[in-house]
Image (cartoon, helix red, strand yellow):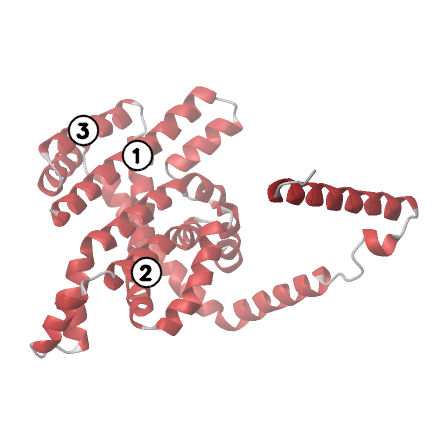
Amino acid sequence: MKLGKNTSTILGLVSLLIILLANSYLIHFLKLDFFIDFPIDISKHLEKSIDNSIEWTILHYGWFFDYISDNLKYLLGKMRTFLVWVPWPITMMAIFLLAWKIASYKVGIMCVIGLGLLAISNLWDPTMVTVAIMIVAVLISIILGIPLGVLGSKNQVADTVMRPILDAMQTMPSFVYLVPGIMLFGLGNVAAILATVLYAIPPCIRLTNLGIRQVDESVVEAGKSFGSNNLQLLLKIQIPMAIPTIMAGINQTVMMALAMSTIAAMVGAGGLGTEVLRAMGQLREGEAVIAGFAIVILAIIIDRISQGYIDKRTI
């Protein structure tokens, strides 16, 4: 009886699997260590090289990292102090007016309700600390991400180089981002900000690149026909038309920065992430759940405001 193509393929794969398993049993039975343990191990040499590179970098460029750390600590401290200093009714009113202006009246009311839930849960101060950390991290991500996205959209070589790097950054476990922060800045808020930036910046770069590439070529050609140079085309045509896509990237960056808040708390970042970790460490499940939902509420508030802006720009 003639077997179908799919059946033959399945039988072939099953036979191959059986042969491989039989060979594996034979290797273990004969105790062929060469085939059990890989004969080459470069881990120790690689680890030593990395350690030496980090020590050399800190020794020769420690002043640079100290300068960055001092300025970020100053900026974060001032912003955190200001946000905590502003009375809660003033903050709620400001958020309501901002949401009403950018999105809609309904979004403004929803934001006030969300902030009210945070306040009555005794999480107002940790929320303001989280907002301060997030603002600094997102600002750095935007300052670095948008120019890199523009560069990728204009230069194919840069895009080719950045693409696998961004792929790796988006697939890497979030805990790994704590490593460079600790190595260069030690424990504290600066390490948390660096980890958050590294984790949250890829969407900003990718969507800025995509938004500029998707601008209608006929509009660009019209700008060229009127004598616009490359810089004018970028600033007056391509970036304004790509704003909805760029804002979507910024929105995703903000969401990822908030998602990183709990993990960043492991290296000394304050705010809601610290509340979650402390409650979990003390087996206070209720407090951990409330602090976790506070992060969700904050994410929803920011998402609705930014999404309202994107929707208005798209119409």
Amino acid carrying mark 3 in the image: Met
Q: Which residue is situated farthest in the right direction here?
A: 30
User: In the depicted view, which residue is nearer to us: 203 or 221?
Assistant: 221
The mark nearer the N terminus, 1 or 2, is 1
The mark nearer the N terminus, 2 or 3, is 3
Q: Is residue 147 left or right of residue 26?
A: left
Q: Which residue is situated farthest in the front direction here?
A: 1
Q: Is residue 44 left or right of residue 107?
A: right
Query: Can residue 22 be seen in this snapshot?
Result: yes
The kind of secondary structure element at disc 3 is helix
Instruction: Relative to 281, say whether 203 is above or below.
Output: below
- As measured in the structure, the alpha-carbon distance from the residue carrying label 1 to the one carrying label 2 is 30 Å
Residue 80 position within the rendered picture, expressed as x and y whole percent measured from the top left: 29, 45
> Which one is in front in this view, the residue at disc 1 or the one at disc 3?
3
The kind of secondary structure element at disc 1 is helix
> Which one is in front in this view, the residue at disc 1 or the one at disc 2?
2
Residue named by callout 1? 125
